[in-house]
Image (cartoon, rainbow, N blue to C red):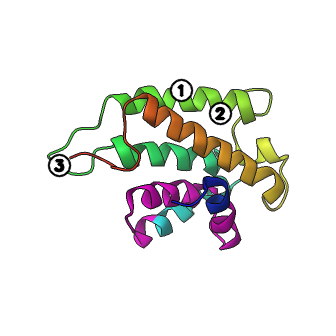
Amino acid sequence: MQDLESAVMEWGQQGFCCSQIMLLAGLAFTEKEDSDMIAAMNGLCRGGFSRRCTCGALTGALCLMGFYAGKGSPAEERDPRLEVMATELQDWFAKKWGADGQLVGCGDILGYVVEPEPGRCYPMVLETLVKTLQLLEEHDFDVRKGRSS
């Protein structure tokens, strides 16, 4: 995959939001395509279209973790590392980006602006994506392989 920072900016310029960008990265790493999943991720954009709800960069990153460690069929089990990674990511995100070190609502982070600000959002998206990939690798997930079933 091309340079991660360039890819994040390109996806943003193509009109994809923070939560969608997280899964676009997972698909790119695994050389898969799933436009239905990317369309579904649109529901998490801009805090689920409510400034009171959790930032889409965080919810998208949690979904990216699920892409690698989640239960995908009746015969599978959720990987127990998912909960551990999710907790680590949420704690990191709240300290790094949360208002007062804890509030992670889209509006809390952006100050209830009408539209997300690319200058503020894309660096946060990129850094959250990098942290998510780091956590996956620290917990022995091969981000190029994807979910092992």
- x, y (%) of residue 103? 72, 33
Decide: few, some or many residues near mark 3? Use Cα within 10 Å; few <14, some 14-19, many ≥20: few
- x, y (%) of residue 55? 66, 47
User: Who comes first in sequence, dot 2 or dot 1?
Assistant: 1
Residue 29 vs residue 127: left or right? left
- For disc 3, the marked residue is 74
- For disc 1, the marked residue is 88
What kind of residue is marked 2?
Answer: Phe
Rendering quarter of residue 78: top left
Residue at the location (73% across, 54% down)? 122
Of 29 and 2, the residue lying toward us: 2
Instruction: Say which element carries label 2.
Output: helix
Of 59 and 68, the residue lying toward us: 68
Q: Can you see residue 15?
A: yes
Q: CA distance from mark 2 to mark 1?
A: 9 Å
Residue at the location (41% across, 46% down)? 143
Q: What segment carries the magenta color?
A: 9-37
Q: Is residue 140 above or below residue 55?
A: above
Q: Is residue 123 magenta?
A: no
